[in-house]
Image (cartoon, rainbow, N blue to C red):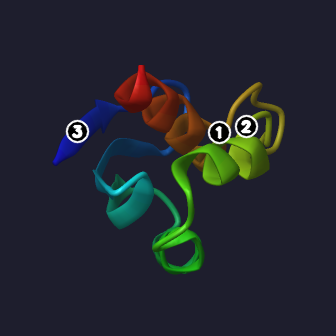
Amino acid sequence: MYNYLTKGVCSSQINFDIVDNKVCNVCFTGGCNGNLKGLSSLIEGMDVNDAIKKLKGITCGGKDTSCPDQLATALEQAVR
């Protein structure tokens, strides 16, 4: 289980697993509950590199980042 403390977004933490290079069990603490449950469901079982490509650079409101972008950063750190 990986644990990532987010920066600059409403959620405070992201927990997830990577199994056979697939993203699994994504769980956000805080943030927009329904949207983040939807995001977690959509990327369940997705190749980690594909998930990073899809999520990297997404912004939220006037912020330079977003919860999806923070997940991409967390995934990048986990596969280094």
User: Image point 59% across, 77% down: which residue?
Assistant: 42
Q: Which residue ends up furthest to the front in the rendered image?
A: 20
Report if the CB atoms under discs 3 and 2 are less than 8 Å apart: no
Alpha carbon distance from label 3 to label 2: 18 Å
Q: Amino acid at mark 1?
A: Asp
Q: Amino acid at mark 2?
A: Lys
Query: Quick one: label 3 or label 2, which is nearer the N terminus?
Result: 3
Alpha carbon distance from label 1 to label 2: 5 Å
The residue beneath circle 3 is 3
In the rendered image, residue 13, in percent from the top left (x then y), is placed at 31, 42
In the rendered image, residue 63, in percent from the top left (x then y), is placed at 75, 30
Question: Quick check: 31 left or right of 61?
Answer: left
The residue beneath circle 2 is 56
Q: Amino acid at mark 3?
A: Asn
Report if the CB atoms under discs 1 and 2 are less than 8 Å apart: yes
The C terminus, quarter of image: top left
Q: Residues within 10 Å of mark 2 (few under 14, many from 20)?
A: some
In the rendered image, residue 3, in percent from the top left (x then y), is placed at 23, 38
The image quarter containing residue 52 is: top right
